[in-house]
């Protein structure tokens, strides 16, 4: 399972799964596979009416968001976001990387019935971005990776808030209240798993606590789903309330399953759309907003806004931030993929045709960003390698 923790392999599996899904959907038997994705696996006695695709995007993907939330909590407590001074620059850059792509999208689709798709190009795929950095950026300073991770974590937090507030229908307050109780109990019970808790020090078996946490986690997911809030938010809430060390161990255990099964399965099914048989002029404006917003909006937003804030930070702290390194991070930020595909499904749930076009736009836009970022990371890595005394992973503008 250790190999599935590799950032490089995670990125390769995601790209392969998405490419395979797109290919299969456009083969002669592709329509049968698309119908299978939309086939329902209902549990009527529980009030769960979900298709195969929704079991993956609403159910399994909650585990991915749990891992993201655990990483976010760690960064906020002991990582690169544990103080205002550390978090300020990546936070400002992340906001720029959200606002500019949204504006680019609205420049194409504003005033149309698909304008609510503006959040789609605002997301960054952490796994993909770090994978590209690992493959092509051996000589980049470690600070570049840290900055990218901090920015991507903040970007995911913004994406989570967007999903919670903009893609939530009528809320069932009773179900939401029950979800809150389950989440609070989950957080309380997780404290029993802390290294110095009385339970652990007494050498009592851990499996009853683990089983109780799983039950509470499933209940939290169920009640969040029934409340009308998107079910993946349950994974976020559980990751944030879980005790930090038990949460880290849980995320470490789940990471290979997320990288090797959940994310590739989601990419496979999300990308399983037929290529529209229309001319470019007949494509919905949302298609062009996503296609341009991801690679162009991200690099412009992160580089310009982050660079301007970096000039202020330099005057205050002396930290030598460069536009070139920010441009590399901006190019990596344009790889939307997982969260962008999810937002596309949510935004265009009532417009299946536009949703298919949006999926293609996410794949193409992320593909362009992958190529651009690979070239940019490679060029910047060679720059640091040429520097006198440079060693892999140290030195450079982001070094301490």
Image (cartoon, grey):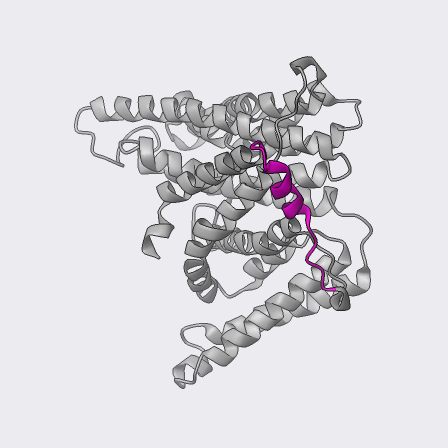
Residue 172, given in percent of the width and then of the height, sits at 81, 59
Residue 243 in picture, x, y percent from top left:
50, 66
Residue 28 is one of the magenta-drawn residues: yes
For this rendering, which residue is in front, 114 or 171?
114
Q: Can residue 347 be seen in this snapshot?
A: yes
- The residue at 42%/42% (across/down) is 13
Q: Residue at x 56, y 26 (%)?
A: 294
Q: Quadrant of the C terminus?
A: top left
Of 397 and 291, nearer the camera is: 291
Residue occupying the point 73% across, 41% down: 166
Q: Is residue 254 above or below residue 35?
A: below
Q: Quadrant of the rendered structure where residue 377 is?
A: top left
Residue interval drawn in magenta: 26-43
**Going by the picture, which residue comes out furthest to the left?**
389
In the displayed structure image, the side of residue 286 where residue 72 appears, left or right: left
Q: Nearer the viewer, residue 367 or 81?
A: 367
Q: Residue furthest front?
A: 28
Residue 16 belongs to the span the image colors magenta:
no
Left or right, 280 with respect to 198, comes to right
Total marks drawn?
A: 0
């Amino acid at each position: 399972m250790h190999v599935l923790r590799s950032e490089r392999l995670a990125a390769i599996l995601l790209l392969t799964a998405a490419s395979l899904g797109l290919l299969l959907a456009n083969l002669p038997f592709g329509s049968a596979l698309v119908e299978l994705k939309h086939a329902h696996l209902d549990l009527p006695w529980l009030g769960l009416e979900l298709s195969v695709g929704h079991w993956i995007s609403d159910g399994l993907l909650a585990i991915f968001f749990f891992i993201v939330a655990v990483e976010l909590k760690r960064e906020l407590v002991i990582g690169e976001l544990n103080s205002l001074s550390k978090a300020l620059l990546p936070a400002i850059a992340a906001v720029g990387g959200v606002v500019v792509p949204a504006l680019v999208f609205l420049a194409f689709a504003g005033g149309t019935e698909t304008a609510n798709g503006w959040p789609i190009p605002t997301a960054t795929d952490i796994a993909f971005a770090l994978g590209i950095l690992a493959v092509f950026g051996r000589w980049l300073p470690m600070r570049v990776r840290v900055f990218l991770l901090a920015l991507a974590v903040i970007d995911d937090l913004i994406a989570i808030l967007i999903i919670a507030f903009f893609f939530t229908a009528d809320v069932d307050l009773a179900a939401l209240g029950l979800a809150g109780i389950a989440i609070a109990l989950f957080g309380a019970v997780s404290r029993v798993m802390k290294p110095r808790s009385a339970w652990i020090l007494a050498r009592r078996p851990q499996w009853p606590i683990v089983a109780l946490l799983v039950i509470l986690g499933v209940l939290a997911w169920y009640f969040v789903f029934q409340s009308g809030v998107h079910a993946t938010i349950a994974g976020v809430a559980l990751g944030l309330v879980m005790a930090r060390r038990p949460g880290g161990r849980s995320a470490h255990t789940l990471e290979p399953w997320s990288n090797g099964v959940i994310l590739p399965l989601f990419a496979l099914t999300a990308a399983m759309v037929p290529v529209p048989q229309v001319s470019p002029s007949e494509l919905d404006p949302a298609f062009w907003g996503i296609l341009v917003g991801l690679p162009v909006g991200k690099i412009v937003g992160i580089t310009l806004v982050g660079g301007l804030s970096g000039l202020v930070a330099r005057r205050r702290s002396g930290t030598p931030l460069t536009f070139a390194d920010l441009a590399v991070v901006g190019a990596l930020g344009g790889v939307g993929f997982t969260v962008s595909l999810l937002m596309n499904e949510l935004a265009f749930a009532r417009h299946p045709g536009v949703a298919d076009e949006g999926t293609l736009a996410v794949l193409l836009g992320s593909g362009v960003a992958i190529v651009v970022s690979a070239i940019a990371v490679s060029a910047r890595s060679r720059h640091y390698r040429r520097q006198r005394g440079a060693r892999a992973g140290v030195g450079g503008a982001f070094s301490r």
